Image: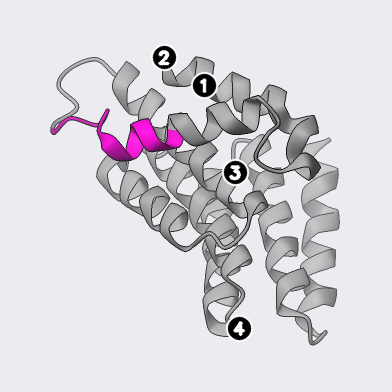
Amino acid sequence: EFERGTKQGLEAVARLESADDPEATGFGWITLGTNYLGAGDCHPALEAFSRASTIGEASGCARVQAMGLAFSGMLRSACMGELDQGLAVCRRAIRIAPDPYSTFYSHLAFVRAVAVVASLPGDPGPPIVDDAFRASVAALEIYADGLQAPALEPWSGLAMAALAEGHL
C-alpha cells in the first residue's frame, strides 16, 4: 500500500504547500518521505525529509526541522551508505529537538543509525559507540519505561526495539 500512500502524500503536500501552516506542511513531507522509504525509494524519501527540515528551519519550527533531520540521518546511514553524514545529521537533530516527541525520534534515529553502521563488516572508522550514543540509549531507556512523557508511553515498545537494535 506504499504506492497508494505515496500518491495520497503527494496530493497532501500539494494542498498543504498552498496553506499557511508550515508545521502541517513539514509533517506532510515527513509522511510522504516515510511512504517513499517504505516502498524502498530512498532518494525521493531523502528529498521529502530534507524538504521538511528546510521548512522547519525557515519557519522556526524546530520540531519539524528535528524530525526531518532525524529521518534524513537515519536514511543516509542505514540505507544510503553515507555513514558519517548520516550520524552527523542525527546528532544535529538531537541538539535542536524541542519537545519529547521530536527528541524521542531523534534519539531513535541515532541509535538505529549507529546499530546499522556498527553491524557492517570491516572497520567503521572512529568509534561510533561514544558518549552521544550512550546518551541516546539512556534517553530511550527512559522512554521505554514510559517515564519521560506519558503521551509517548504507547511507543515504549518502539523505544525498546531501538534499544535492542543498539545492542546488536
Mark 3 vs mark 2: which is more N-terminal? 3
**Which residue is label 1 attached to?**
163
- Left or right of residue 49: residue 129: left
The reply to whether the C-beta atoms of the residues labelled 2 and 1 are less than 8 Å apart is yes
**Which residue is label 4 attached to?**
59
Mark 4 vs mark 3: which is more N-terminal? 4
Q: Give the image location of residue 137, x and y in percent.
A: 45, 29
- Can residue 101 be seen? yes
Which numbered dot is residue 167? 2
Q: Residue at x 80, y 85 (%)?
A: 18
Q: Amino acid at mark 2?
A: His
Q: Please, what secondary structure does the residue beneath circle 1 have?
A: helix
Distance of label 1 from label 3 (alpha carbons): 12 Å
Q: Give the image location of residue 130, x and y in percent.
A: 25, 33
Distance of label 4 from label 3 (alpha carbons): 22 Å
Where does the magenta region start and end?
126-136
Q: Residues within 10 Å of mark 1 (few under 14, many from 20)?
A: many
Tag nearer the camera, 4 or 1: 1
Which numbered dot is residue 104? 3
- Left or right of residue 153: residue 133: left
Mark 4 vs mark 2: which is more N-terminal? 4
Tag nearer the camera, 4 or 3: 3
Check residue 26 for magenta coloring. Answer: no
Q: Amino acid at mark 3?
A: Phe
Mark 1 vs mark 3: which is more N-terminal? 3
Q: Residue at x 58, y 56 (%)?
A: 67
Q: Residue at x 78, y 70 (%)?
A: 24
